[in-house]
Image (cartoon, rainbow, N blue to C red):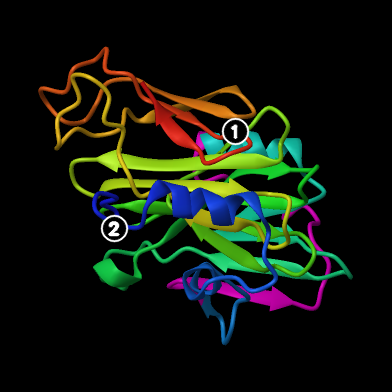
Amino acid sequence: MKMIRGAASLATVVAVFAVTSYAQTEKQDERTALPSKGLLWGSKMTVEAQPCCAPIPGAKPVDRSDAAVLSKVPDRASRDGPILRLKLQDGRTLKITDCNDQAACEAERFRVHRLAAWWPAQRLYVVDVGLYEDGMAYLISERDGRTTRVTAVPVLSPSGRRAVALTSNLMAGVELNLIDLGSDPPTVLEVSEMPACAGADANAFLRPKPVWVDDSQVRFEGVSPQPGDKPDTKQLLRLGAGSPKWEC
């Protein structure tokens, strides 16, 4: 759900975020899974018992951004048209296939997958997933292909121990994910309150660009998608030793 107003309290969210628990919530379990019977989260995904990623003669990139990332990790990822392959441990490969043929893929099945990053310290692939009228992202473990679903391509903190993913637009609403990368799989929690600093309207949106000030502060920059939002309203989320809070 992509409207964060009126959900669980921010203090509760961060209390869980601060401590990696052995018993994750049902919602977290719904965010992380292995591909089963060729599908996961509506995407065509299969773990194959063969190595990746030998160059494919005649293979063509599907877009420039994907090609740029793939060129940096030729031994880990490859593309053959709509098929993206990612190297897993133990000589296996995760095969992800787009479904973007307008004649064959109705809206609920439409998926395109673009490799956005390889995070070597975390051993995670970041895949940007385009939907028919929205999007999300996958954090995919190199170990076994286990996939964690987040709202958008995340932004790493300076230390690489955390990340933040944000959707903020008039069509989808607002969803803000805090991601703990110290656990395997990553723990994702939703920030469920909006900042209420002076000048903020009850219907204000987060500005769309999260920027880490340091490892404990995230500032939101850019132009709000909500017409009429005041551009100088403070939007700073502090993740200190205690309960994180919006700072005014």
Q: Residue at x 24, y 34 (%)?
A: 205
Q: What percent of the width, then of the height, locates residue 118?
A: 70, 44
Q: Nearer the viewer, residue 219 or 42?
A: 219
Is residue 234 in the magenta section? no
Q: What percent of the width, then of the height, locates residue 189?
A: 50, 55
Please give the residue where the numbered disc 2 appears in the rendered image.
Answer: 132
Q: Nearer the viewer, residue 101 or 77?
A: 77
Q: Which mark's residue is nearer the viewer, 1 or 2?
A: 1
Mark-to-mark CA distance, 1 and 2: 38 Å
Q: Which residues are magenta?
A: 40-64
The circle on residue 240 is 1
- Say above or below: 210 vs 6: above
- Say above or below: 200 vs 37: above
Q: The residue tagged with tag 2: helix, strand or loop?
A: loop
Kind of residue at disc 2: Tyr
Q: Residue at x 27, y 21 (%)?
A: 223
Q: Is residue 158 left or right of residue 14?
A: right
Kind of residue at disc 1: Gly
